[in-house]
Image (spheres, rainbow, N blue to C red):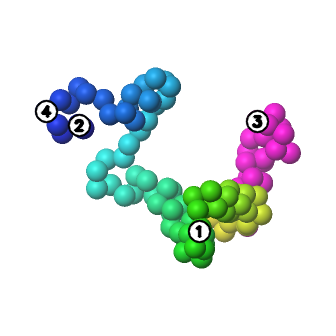
Amino acid sequence: MRRTAHPERLSGFERFLREQQFIHGVSAPHSPWQNAIIERSHRTDNEELFRCFEFQSSEERKYRLRLWEYEYNNRRPHMGLGGETPIQVYRKLYFFHARSRELI
């Protein structure tokens, strides 16, 4: 939409963001280093979930993804976090916030 004859026209996505008062950031084109965390996450999801299962429906895919996210964040140690899970690190760094959300 940005490169059309009507650059001021918003896409449906952009209208939704504006209505919900969300701030949406994007990385520069051809700059993969700006979104490395997301790319790594997608790679891990693909290698350890999506390539291992053949889903029968979108509901099954959503269900398996929820199970995988729980496992990944709550039970699986991460080398980059010193052998701890993301939730353990979160509880240490953001004790009061985690407590207010009953994550302790």
Q: Which residues are magenta?
A: 83-104
- Indicate the quadrant containing the N terminus: top left, top right, bottom left or bottom right: top left
Residue 87 lies left or right of residue 64; in this view the side is: right
Q: Which three-letter amino acid code belongs to the residue tagged 1?
A: Phe
Q: Could you give the CA–CA distance between mark 3 and mark 1, rounded to whole angstroms?
A: 36 Å
Q: Nearer the viewer, mark 2 or mark 4?
A: 4
Q: Which three-letter amino acid code belongs to the residue tagged 4?
A: Ala
Of 24 and 19, the residue lying toward us: 19
Magenta stretch containing residue 12, yes or no? no
Q: Which residue is mark 4?
A: 5
Q: Earlier in the sequence, mark 3 or mark 2?
A: 2
Crowding at dot 4, Cα within 10 Å, few <14 / some 14-19 / many 20+, comes out as few
Q: Using the image, determine if residue 63 lies above or below residue 83.
A: above
Q: Could you give the CA–CA distance between mark 4 and mark 1, rounded to whole angstroms?
A: 41 Å
Q: Secondary structure at mark 1?
A: loop
Q: Which residue is mark 1?
A: 55
Residue 64's tag is none
Q: Could you give the CA–CA distance between mark 1 and mark 2, rounded to whole angstroms?
A: 36 Å
Q: Which residue is mark 3?
A: 97
**Image point (86%, 45%), residue name:** 104
Q: x%, y% of residue 27?
A: 36, 46
Q: x%, y% of residue 71?
A: 73, 63
Q: Which residue is mark 2?
A: 2
Q: Nearer the viewer, mark 4 or mark 1?
A: 1
How many marks overall? 4
Q: Which three-letter amino acid code belongs to the residue tagged 2?
A: Arg
Residue 57 lies left or right of residue 4; in this view the side is: right
